[in-house]
Amino acid sequence: MSRYSAICHIIDQIRLTRDIFHLVLNAPDIARAARPGQFCMLATAHGKGLDPLLRRPLSIHDVGPSGRLEFLYRVVGRGTDLLAQKGPGDIVCVLGPLGQGFRLGTSSSSILVGGGLGTAPLLFLARGLEPRDITIILGGRDAQEIVRLDSFEKVAEKVLVTTEDGSLGIKGLVTSALERLDISPSSHIQHPPAIFACGPWPMMKAVCNWAAIRGLAVQVSLETQMACGTGICLGCATRSSGQDRYLHVCKDGPVFFATDIDWG
Ligand SMILES: Cc1cc2nc3c(=O)[nH]c(=O)nc-3n(C[C@H](O)[C@H](O)[C@H](O)COP(=O)(O)OP(=O)(O)OC[C@H]3O[C@@H](n4cnc5c(N)ncnc54)[C@H](O)[C@@H]3O)c2cc1C
Ligand code: FES
């Protein structure tokens, strides 16, 4: 699989909410090679500065014509704060695409579930899925956390929104929306939907439990702290469901089948 280390110009950087940003880079090689579910490591230091030294991992949100490479991220600390201060014309050094993305398969329908900024990889995923009977569930604490809704609505047959405070869509967690889909254990024996999830660990665990009851396979995109992003530092280990084995999220993932993970 090809990966590139590229110096990319920022085409656009839009502040969507107080702390969520949509970054668009010009990165033709990475955009061409990228597959849904893969991520990039972005250097966030300004100019020739080395602080922070380590690049930060972000999921590929979308790719577009003429080499557009898009990210959706929340400012949580120093690296993302520095990235958010950059604007059109500034440069960002990017390593990618990295990791194993989603297996797209041939299921006749798909359900994509994202919580918080776990929605980021789902747009590119939805574009890559065939056939196109796609339901996307976007969950957040409140309406402010539901971003790029119009873009998601363009790539899916159905989009359901849940917010914990009820300020948008269904009041509750993403599982409230899953229950509304009325999928019983026997209703999809012939054509089981493919389930994809990305978000906080408890959310993904709940989605996996919902799917397990119905005998459905789930692919999850995991997040851990990452230093290198390329399998060298071994800092991104997560426990696998196999005996005494660790998986490395940057190299073996970030996308895994739920049954491969020890959910604790
Ligand atoms: C494969 C992958 C894809 C990701 N995709 C996205 C994305 O598309 N959009 C997005 O907003 N974020 C994404 N993240 C998380 C993002 O990498 C971190 O938020 C970012 O590295 C934080 O850097 P910082 O310097 O701003 O914060 P730091 O100063 O490094 O940390 C600030 C706080 O955030 C916590 N933190 C840092 N990294 C993570 C993490 N990976 N998971 C949970 N908590 C963390 C730290 O413990 C600390 O409390 C992804 C992470 C991985 C591993
Ligand atoms: S982040 Fe270094 S091995 Fe995964």
Image (tube, rainbow, N blue to C red):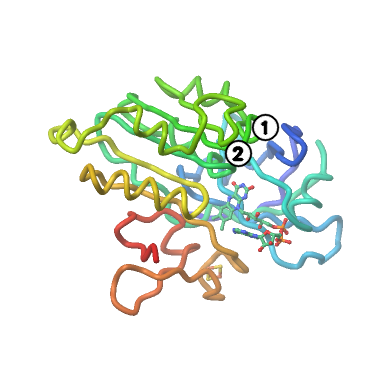
Q: Going 39% across and 62% down the picture, which residue do you hit?
A: 263
Which dot, 2 or 1, sits closer to the camera? 2
Going by the numbered disc 1, the residue's amino acid type is: Gln
Per the image, label 2 sits on a secondary structure element best described as loop
Is 230 situated above or below 108? below
Across and down, in percent, residue 71 comes to 63, 41
Reading the image, the residue beneath label 2 is 141
Q: In the image shown, does 89 or 177 lie closer to the viewer?
A: 177
Across and down, in percent, residue 260 comes to 32, 62
Mark 1 CB near ligand 1 (8 Å cut): no
Going by the numbered disc 2, the residue's amino acid type is: Arg
> Which residue reaches farthest bottom?
244
Q: Quadrant of the C terminus?
A: bottom left
Q: Which mark is residue 236?
A: none
Q: Residues within 10 Å of mark 2 (few under 14, many from 20)?
A: some
Per the image, label 1 sits on a secondary structure element best described as helix
Q: Which mark is residue 144?
A: 1
Q: Going 76% across and 34% down the picture, which residue do you hit?
A: 15
Across and down, in percent, residue 76 comes to 72, 53
